[in-house]
Amino acid sequence: MKVFINKKWLVLIVATALFSACDNSLQFQPTNQLSNEIVAGSPALLANVTTGNYSYLKEPNYVRMRHIMQEYPGDNVMLSGSTSDHLLYSYNYGHVVNSNVSLNFWRTAYYGIYGTNVVIESIDDNDSEELRQLKGENLFLRALMHFDLLRGFARPYSQNPDSNLGVMIRDNTDASALPARSTVRESYEFVVNDLLKAAELMTDAKDPIYATREAAWALLARAYLYMERYDQALEYADKVIQSGRYQLLETSRLGEYFTYLPEANPETIFAIKHLSTENRGRSSIGSMYHGDGGWGEIYASKPYRDLLDKYPHDERHKFIEPAYILDEEGNRIPDPSEDVGYLLDKRNGISKYFITKYTRQENIPMLSSPVVLRLAEMYLIKAEAYAILPGRESEALEMVNVIRERAGLSGSDLYTTGDLKGHNSVLDVVLEERWLELAWEGHRAMDQFRNNRPIDRRYANAGAWSGPEVIQPDSPSIVHLIPEAELTLNPNLVQNPN
């Protein structure tokens, strides 16, 4: 089959061109499009294809579905009622084979991966610096998409990586190939190798809306942490920190972190940029989290709020916005029965604690550029690695305190080896700080499961919750099911246990 590429955009014709056997009777020849061979010989066209590959990340079927699959299984969120949106299945662990969340994410990720392969195959490692940069950026994007697929459809690396199935590795543009799922170990090694190569090829210090050497290092640090290769996680997190390209956003601005353009935020390493013209309103990630222009049906969970409330001066309170009921003069109405002391608006009897991390970029209520990698995570990766490596617990707490001090905490709110504030271990301290700092950014469920810890959903005894009170890390339901439509197209795929 001959596949064609648009001069400005990668055109991926139909899903069957990617996942089913090639039919030589089909020749797609859209107007003003060029063959792979012509594109491969033009740096300008390869750059245009790369722009199209970045655009896959901000397709709703990628960025929104990615968020649903990674964040909604955690314990940061409280869904206040049932919904016909298939996000419900990710939230309540009731996975189905025809979930449009899983299907749309799977297909869009592999569309993007195909596009990256067009560029990667077209550039030799000895080509010009400009072309090597493009190849490196596409290797990063290919690794990120495979990694995101792993997080949704494969069990944590810490659980039998040589026998558990990972994802379908797509490392070429052969549309007739029908790969089986590789093991978890093989899939992670593929991601790591792509990132190592990407970091080697990229030399441009681009804005954080593009792949860079530092972004590859940051994703390597995360991947190595998941793989329990702690020395390497430390190495690459430290490379990012020591690069000097990023600084933690100052305490006074922390509450506004996610309202800034990524290019204007010194902490952001890589983000999925949305322009003001790309505001998706009620179809945005933030729509479920806030009522100012959105549906406002998912709120900050009580366990998270209770943890945060232990530290009244923590600036991370600003990412939660209680929906107070106001009197005619615009004042809050006292109500001692509420834990905030004022009357709160409710939905289905559940108090509304809106989440602001995906709102108000450029003062547009539902606009945001989701952050994929940021510097605070690098400190917390180092903290977790130190907590597990022998004899390095004090260094772990030092990294935790960097994040706590940035959040406005000091004195007795900081940790020492002699004062873990009731925690049983330094690892407990680190994982709790990851919970506080990275809430609603897609980390919590994976952090628990990869560390052989459960997700406690006993707080969600109302609304849409009908799943188990506690989700154990060995439960079959912690991973999404492979979409049924993809199993039909590719008989070599094997379904996850249900």
Image: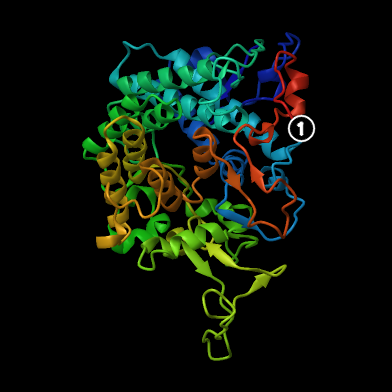
Q: Is residue 258 above or below residue 6?
A: below
Label 1 environment density (alpha carbons within 10 Å; few <14, some 14–19, many ≥20):
some
Residue farthest to the top?
24
Q: Is the N terminus in the top left, top right, bottom left or bottom right quadrant? A: top right
Quarter-of-image position of residue 405: bottom left
Its colouring scheme is: rainbow
Amino acid at the residue labelled 1: Val
Callout 1 secondary element: loop
Residue 417: give x, y in percent of width and height: 27, 46
Quarter-of-image position of residue 409: bottom left
> Which sits in the foreground, 417 or 344?
417
- Which residue lies at the image location 65% right of the left edge and 29% below the top edge? 107
Q: Is residue 492 left or right of residue 230?
A: right
- Residue 201: tell me if it is visible: yes
Q: Is residue 72 above or below residue 334?
A: above
> Which sits in the foreground, 117 or 455?
455
Residue 180: give x, y in percent of width and height: 65, 13
- Residue 28: tell me if it is visible: no
- Which residue lies at the image location 70% right of the left edge and 33% below the top edge? 103
Residue 370: give x, y in percent of width and height: 48, 47
Which residue does the numbered mark 1 point to in the structure image? Answer: 97
Residue 275: give x, y in percent of width and height: 47, 50
Q: Is residue 283 above or below residue 123?
A: below
Q: Is residue 23 left or right of residue 400?
A: right
